[in-house]
Image (cartoon, rainbow, N blue to C red):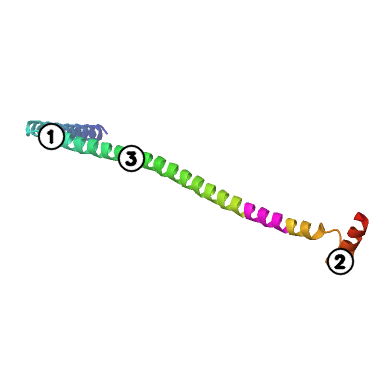
């Protein structure tokens, strides 16, 4: 039984040693990679991306501002156009009402002149004779 324990301990020690060696190798690889990456010449990639990002942001902002102003101008034009159309329609309606009123007044004047006779036209000679008799 003691022999089994000793074998298990030896195996554990070997596994610990191999794990430690793997970690050392990984650490050395990571340090070597960082040293290589750190010593490479630095290219201003981020500045290039940032300048394009800034340019795109400004361009989109300008498009948004111009779109807002154009929308306001269009809305004002549309409201003015509707007001002009409404005014033209009101003027046309007023002309129609004036024409109808004049026509109605003319009709009423004709009816009034027709009705205002004291006697019908067939009885007019008799009415003149009676008027002549009353003056004598």
Task: Name the residue rendered at 92%, 59% in the picture.
Answer: 133
Q: Which dot, 1 or 3, sits closer to the camera?
A: 3
Q: Which mark is residue 44?
A: 1
Image quadrant assignment for residue 22: top left
Task: Tell me whether the residue at label 2 lies in contact with that at label 3, contact meaning CB atoms closer than 8 angstroms.
Answer: no
Q: For residue 126, which quarter of the picture?
A: bottom right
Relative to 1, does residue 99 appear above or below in the rendering? below
Residue bearing the label numbered 2: 125
- The magenta-colored residue range is 97-107
**Residue 30 location, x and y as percent?**
14, 33
Answer above or below: position of 69 versus 114. Answer: above
Q: Answer yes or no: do the residues labelled 1 and 2 have beta carbons within 8 Å?
A: no
Residue 134 image position (x, y, % from top left): 93, 56
Residue 86 percent coordinates (x, y)? 54, 48
Mark 1 and mark 2: span between their CA atoms?
A: 121 Å
Q: Nearer the viewer, residue 79 or 87?
A: 87
Earlier-in-chain disc, 1 versus 3: 1
């Amino acid at each position: 039984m003691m022999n089994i324990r000793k074998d298990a301990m030896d195996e554990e020690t070997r596994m610990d040693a191999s794990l430690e060696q793997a970690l050392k190798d990984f650490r050395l690889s990571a340090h070597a990679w960082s040293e290589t990456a750190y010593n490479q010449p630095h290219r201003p990639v981020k500045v290039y991306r940032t300048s394009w990002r800034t340019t795109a942001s400004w361009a989109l902002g300008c498009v948004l501002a111009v779109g807002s102003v154009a929308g306001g101008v269009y809305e004002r034009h549309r409201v003015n156009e509707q007001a002009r159309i409404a005014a033209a329609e009101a003027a046309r309606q007023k002309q129609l009402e004036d024409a109808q009123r004049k026509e109605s007044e003319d009709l009423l004047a004709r009816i009034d002149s027709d009705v205002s006779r004291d006697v019908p036209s067939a009885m007019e000679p008799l009415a003149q004779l009676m008027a002549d008799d009353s003056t004598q």
